[in-house]
Image: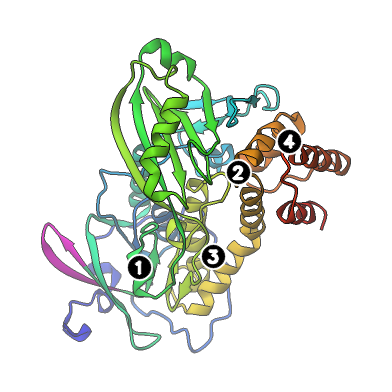
Amino acid sequence: MAASQLQNPLKTPSSQLSIKKHKPCFLKPRRLTVSAAHPHLNGRKLRVAVIGGGPAGSSAAEALASGGIETFLFERSPSTAKPCGGAIPLCMVDEFSIPHHLIDRHVTKMKIISPSNLTVDFGSKSLRAHESIPMLRREVLDAFLRNRAESAGAQLIPSLVTHLEIPSSSLSPYIIHHTVNNSRKTLAVDVIVGADGANSKVAKFIKAGNYTCAIAFQERIRLPDEKMEYYQNLAEMYVGNDVSPDFYAWVFPKCDHVAVGTGTVCGKQDIKMYQQGIKQRVKNKIKGGKVIKVEAHPIPEHPRPVRVRGRVALVGDAAGYVTKCSGEGIYFAAKSGRMCGEGIVRASEGGEWMISDDDLKREYLMEWDKKYVSTFRFLDLLQRVFYGSNEAREALVEVCGSEYVQRMTFDSYLYKKLAKGDRWEDLKMVFATFGSLMRCKIVGRDMAAFNLQLFP
């Protein structure tokens, strides 16, 4: 079907669309010089479709709608959520105004257990009195963020996107084909934000390139009260070839159950074997528990080769924003969505002007890379150094016994920026790390690269 034969809302003034209007709540668009190549949108506002209603998509939609953009938020399954450990950094609670009643647990203690069952208490001494790691359920968080985006003025469309028609010119609309209750519909928009996860259809339509994916597998297990009491404010991480050849396994507390899971890149075909491995390691702690849900999901291992093409931008898992080493993605998903939405608002001056590929790269992509690319590279290096063998994992757990290492780790994780440490303590940490690695006979090229990262 030709685009000209479709019902095209780009020709309909905003006043004739039944979308709630709200004043922007936190965005202050920056005035830019707009060239003749960016025409003024007379009689209507810029229209943006956000495809995917997780933390990335909902945060993008909220930022867009709050900034005066006509916003459509597509989510195929509003009642479901991506399988996820559910840990978020402390800074996200205030930065994204997450209500405290959504948080199931405030973890103040962690244990890291090596292949030989060497256990290090992580946080009991190094966390400050007001600090914790909030744990929540993705289905609860996702629903809250979607509802907030709707309250800001985004129109939620519970629909499966099946196809995108790419425009032939810089001013023509993108046509989104989607199905609602087995009924085929179309929508024309100026800009698309792809927030549809690791298997992103949007990325495929714009030929954004592939990336390596890990698989995460977890079981939610409801424990007897006395067993659940042990995990009241405790999370556990296990490393070893029996639970993952290149990642870690976890036991994270939820409201009335625990999530027990693992992840891997190179051993995806054996994921159930590794899941049995972690359940064997914790069998006495979860004895008598009942599995209430089984979940699995792909997780990107690095950013896509292309994250902006034309007037389409990728955010969250669709862009590949999951950190190595920790496997964290919730904060970076929400942050990338918000940064992308705010960038579109700035570039369009509150939805008054058409935007371009260069605008998206300048206002979103360059800002994102400037802020976070060093963090992603550093954690990638840590994973290569410490997750490659059981000997390296023993060294990792040994190094984590240092209160200075723990404090630096928490400062970086909780507040989402690489912590600036004491040079003398950094030097001692490097020597201690070398000592642990030498005892494990694994000092090599990756450790030299790690050293260069600390002392450029």
Q: Position of residue 53 (x, y in %)?
A: 34, 53
Question: Mark 4 = which residue?
Answer: 405
Foreground mark, 3 or 4, reads 4
Q: Amino acid at mark 2?
A: Ser
Distance (Cα) linking label 3 and label 1: 27 Å
Q: Position of residue 259 (x, y in %)?
A: 40, 31
Please tell me whether residue 265 is drawn above or below residue 356 in the rendered image: above
Foreground mark, 4 or 1, reads 4
* Image: magenta residue range: 178-188
The residue under the point 63% across, 25% down is 118
Colouring? rainbow
Distance (Cα) linking label 2 and label 4: 21 Å
Is 142 positioned to the left or the right of 346 in the image? Answer: left
Foreground mark, 3 or 1, reads 1
Give the secondary structure at mark 3: loop
Question: Marks 4 and 2: in contact by CB < 8 Å?
Answer: no
**Mark 3 or 4, nearer chain start:** 3
**Mark 2 or 3, nearer chain start:** 3
Give the secondary structure at mark 2: loop
Q: Position of residue 26 (x, y in %)?
A: 51, 53
Distance (Cα) linking label 1 and label 2: 37 Å
The residue under the point 34% across, 88% down is 168
Foreground mark, 1 or 2, reads 2
Question: Mark 1 = which residue?
Answer: 202
View extreme (right): residue: 424
Question: Mark 3 = which residue?
Answer: 29
Residue 47 visible in the current orientation: no
Distance (Cα) linking label 4 and label 1: 40 Å
**Mark 1 or 2, nearer chain start:** 1
Please tell me whether residue 240 is drawn above or below residue 334 in the rendered image: above
Question: Mark 2 = which residue?
Answer: 389
Q: Position of residue 51 (x, y in %)?
A: 33, 61
